[in-house]
Amino acid sequence: MKTLRGSNHNGMRQFNERTVLRAIRHAGAIPKADLARLTQLSTQTVSIIVNRLLDDGLLVKQDRVRGKIGQPSVPLSINADGAYSIGIQVGRRSLEVVVTDFLGQLRHQWEHAYDYPNPVVVLPKIQEALTLMQAQLGEAWPRCVGIGLSAPLAMHQWGDVLGAQASLEMRAWEHIDLIAEVQAMTALPVEFAKDTTAACVAELVQGTGREVSRFLYVFVGTFVGGGLVLDGLIVNGPRGNAGAIGSMPMGVNPHSRGIQLLEIASGWQLEQSLMQKKLDPLLVQDDAIMNADYQSLTQSWLAQASSALAMCIASSAALLDLEAVVLDGSISPLLLKALCDHTQAAMQQFRFDGMVAPALLAGKVGRHARALGGALLPLHAQFFPDKDIFLKQDEA
């Protein structure tokens, strides 16, 4: 079990409260005595903190446990309704807004699709969604602690891939401060993370990150992107580019600047193939895409995308000594599984001599990962021991 150490010194109330909350998140329902041993805080300190958290509605008491040696114990657990958070994900094909509870569970979800993210359309839609979420929370709205905003770092880039008109209108994002625009819509504090980093946050907290501490995260949406987790911590880099696998070069073309992973292994390539056949590009998000009618399109895309992802995995493993690569996305779950299987097979084409091939694992969070990860940011900023979201933990 992982040990989360608090402090018995004065002036550490907030840190110790956060340590207790995090310990309960990890351990589940737990009595005060066990909580004191787990956090290495004194029994008196834990008792004071627990009583305060109960009064604040952040913890709840479970039924008394009897039949063991000593006095019956009362397990304590996180109150899912103790706090709420909003996640806003501004993507290149859709806007998604969610509400999560104190356990990080989705309570409300709203989505608006578009051909490309025109700020003239997107910004009013964000305001509309925030008004809707406040109405849905009703009397619980005062327990909403903040907004987590996620979006690509450079929304205006690669607009030409989406078409000439999209490229023209998306240039406006270069002069828009998205964080400031959203902050002007609400009195709640706004936290920001790159979209794939937010998705990686969700996977780290709610998915594979519970068992794996060193992994490359790959999210396949309209464009492919990623995140990096080393020793249980998300690594962003000083400019936020760590894990930005979408920009990874896949070869050099003598007549151009070369080709990047996002130009081969993104959902957009399959969408284009569908549009050329006068079919709905959003089929990439529907399991119907795996029907025999679309097999020629899906098999072609799977072959090129899996080969490119396998090369990305081999290159990343040589640099980072990864335990695993986690593959998730907003495309159809059946298509995503096929991509995972094809990538596993394509990895056999590469030599892993002198290193250990990482395990290829399916993500556990799914298409809502970016919005969900955004919603987790305010919760962790306010209720976890470290503002940096994920504190290194000692092995007991």
Image (cartoon, rainbow, N blue to C red):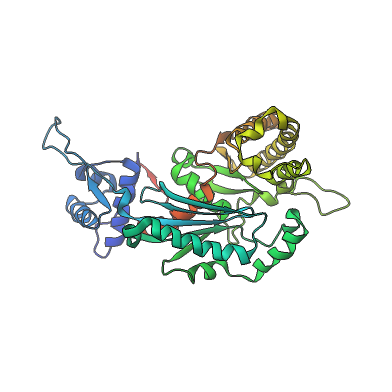
Question: Whole-percent x and y of residue 114?
Answer: 63, 54
Question: Whole-percent x and y of residue 2?
Answer: 36, 42
The answer to which of 345 and 316 lies nearer the viewer is 345
The answer to which of 31 and 163 lies nearer the viewer is 163
Quadrant of the rendered structure where residue 269 is? top right
Task: State the residue lying farthest toward the right.
Answer: 255
Residue 381 appears in the rendering: no
Task: State the residue lying farthest toward the left.
Answer: 71
User: In the figure, 375 relative to 310: above or below?
Assistant: below
Count of picture labels: 0
Instruction: Classify residue 71 as left or right of residue 53.
Output: left
User: In the figure, 322 relative to 108: above or below?
Assistant: above
The answer to which of 234 and 175 lies nearer the viewer is 175
Q: Residue at x 67, y 31 (%)?
A: 342
User: In the figure, 237 relative to 216: above or below?
Assistant: below
Q: Residue at x 30, y 53 (%)?
A: 82
